[in-house]
Amino acid sequence: MPEGAPRWRLGFWSLIVTQFQGAFNENGLKYFFIYLILSLHLDTKQEDHLIFLIGALFAAPFILFSMTGGYLADRFSKRSVTIGTKIFEIAVVIFSVSALLGFHSHTESTIPLLLVAIFLASSQAAIFGPSKYGLLPELLPESELSWGNGVIELGTFLAIIAGTVIGSRLPERFSGGEVNGAYFFLACSVAGLLTAYFITRVPAADPAKKYRINVFGDLFTHLRNSRLDRALWLAIVGNTYFWFLGALLQFNVVLYGERVLHVPASQSAELQAAIAIGIGVGSFVAGSLSGGRIEYGLVPLGALGMTVFGFLLSLSHLTFLNILILLAALGFSGGFFIVPVSALIQHRPDEKDKGGVIASANLLSFIGVAAAAGVPTLFSQYLHLGPRAVFLWASVGTLIAATYLIFLLPDSLLRLLLWLATHTLYRIHTKGGENVPARGGAMLCPNHSSMVDGVLLIASTDRPIRFLMFKGSYEHWLVKPFARILGVIPIASNQGPRELIHSLRAATDALKNGELLCIFPEGQMTRIGQMLPFRRGLERIMKGVEAPIIPVYIDGVWGSIFSFAGGKFLWKFPRKIPYPVQVTFGPPLPSSSPAQEVRRKFRNGRWAHAEVELFFGADESHISCTTVAETLERSADGRTFPAAIHTRRADELCRDVDGKGSGKFELYGFLGIAGVLRPTMRTENDSHVKVVS
């Protein structure tokens, strides 16, 4: 990523504008030619045949040249490839201008030339695709990748909207002078070339890469490697299905408007615009809600929406407004589906293979587009079913695909449920997410203040986490099904030696296999809001493993209904909904760090502030935080001593940090800390707090 926010912002937005123009021209030309052909009023069979050819020729270059585009994206600077494709795009539009000069005088010979122009325009897009998406992780910090995907998907589909609407209206607008429409697209191409020069310069990813004549050999190599990563492979399959469904709906909406609704081309374009607007807005919302993470729990939610709204579109007696709303809702659901899928494809491959994997995904997606081009013809000419039936069977196919996804990757459904819970009951703010490695094994060591700490951690990172859990909790009938889905490792100190060694070995193997592991090193949930001593199980797991230890501080959860604040779990009213929580990932520590050294890392951080605020009040705590932390550190095993308290705020001692009463339990904790601090306490105002024997 280039240094400096202004630099990456200029390069990123230049890419967005360049991509917008390219998608606008690509789709504008396609629909310009489609509605030129429809304006000839050919018979139904000829129209079906030509629409199939347009769809097939539009998709074929992505099958033939995507791997070449991936090679170019790896071999050369992606910025240079982008500029080169823009120059080629200008040449294609000039070819279209020459073809349209004889549209009325030589109609039969002009149509094949227009089909060639569609093939060439798609060839340019196929070569540009891997560089376009490959530039995102090179221009953006990882925390902005989901947001960047949301923006580029929004821009793409806004361009599709504009291209579809304008392209479908140009034949009517320039009736008798259709070549003027091609001149308009030529001016847009020149503007796109200019913006491409403002994209930030980036180095080539693999300058020594060799071109293989058998490009499909590269495809099979990348797909074989991708299958080793189940999440990446399912993302590629999901991406293929999304583009198949999107292309199918595009063709079907054209026929739906003409043959079912009997509306003119301008209103048919509004139907296309509705679904594109939905996808664009859904993509942007999904990127924003992801909170800087790849939230693949949104995938089943999007699939469910596409299933429901596709089924509703198959019903009869719908008004034009009903259809517009349903198409927009279907597109919105599609945006939730595609954003995490696209982010996974961009993020999970190794840097040296990223261009090839993205190109492979593009190739497969356009195999889906090519297949979609033949579905309306199959339904119309052979099954004698109309466009409504296409909507119905598309929704059935989506339901089957979503069910299969959940079967293969059940934690995606669990992440969906957790995502819904943590975006309604909690408002999570994450800091230090960059300290969690994107790949490879790592050990998370959080404090343990509530029953939902694990859920909050899952919602704070896009990497799957495996937890070590007390076996008694693991075996609970309500917990065990979800624990098995997450790959939780049960462990208990009262296990026999063989079972204990098996659990520890499973944890060590998880780290060596590059998984993200989490252990609550205190060994139990705090009952007094203080951090307890760390057990040495952490050291036993990390012995002989080269993986970083990441201290994690979960702030604000003490006092919630799932903590023991007030001397009880659950049986108290929530203070706020959504409940604010902050999860902070600290800098990584060496794997050889002793447990108490990991614990001491909390000392100069937020822990000291949290304990002072909890027991002395959040508005004004005059006790040195360092004194609190150091004194607690010197208390050998966390034992505290009773003391008497004299303070003008004695009436507030039974209240938590936000002033809400929660019982006498906090008072006992206060007394304990006061007893520990008695010999060394330092105050700035002795009249405010006084500890006496």
Image (spheres, rainbow, N blue to C red):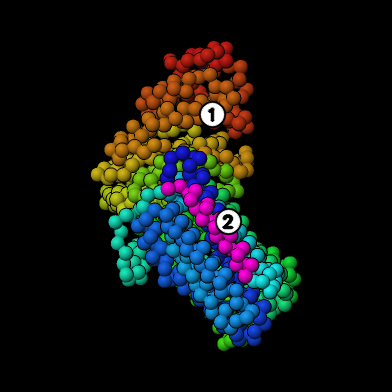
Q: Main secondary structure of the magenta part?
A: helix
Q: Nearer the viewer, residue 634 or 26?
A: 26
Q: Amino acid at mark 1?
A: Leu
**Label 1 neighbour load within 10 Å: few <14, some 14-19, many 20+:** many
**Residue 195 is inside the magenta segment:** yes
Identify the magenta region: 179-201
Place of residue 564 in the rendered image (x, y in percent of width and height, measured from the top left)? 52, 38
| 176 lies left or right of 691 | right
**Label 2 neighbour load within 10 Å: few <14, some 14-19, many 20+:** many
Q: Which residue is mark 1?
A: 614
Q: Which residue is mark 2?
A: 154
Which residue appears at 58% of the width and 30% of the height? 656
Upstream in sequence: badge 2 or badge 1: 2
Q: Is residue 286 above or below residue 666?
A: below
Whether residue 296 is visible here, answered yes or no, is no
**Residue 184 is inside the magenta segment:** yes
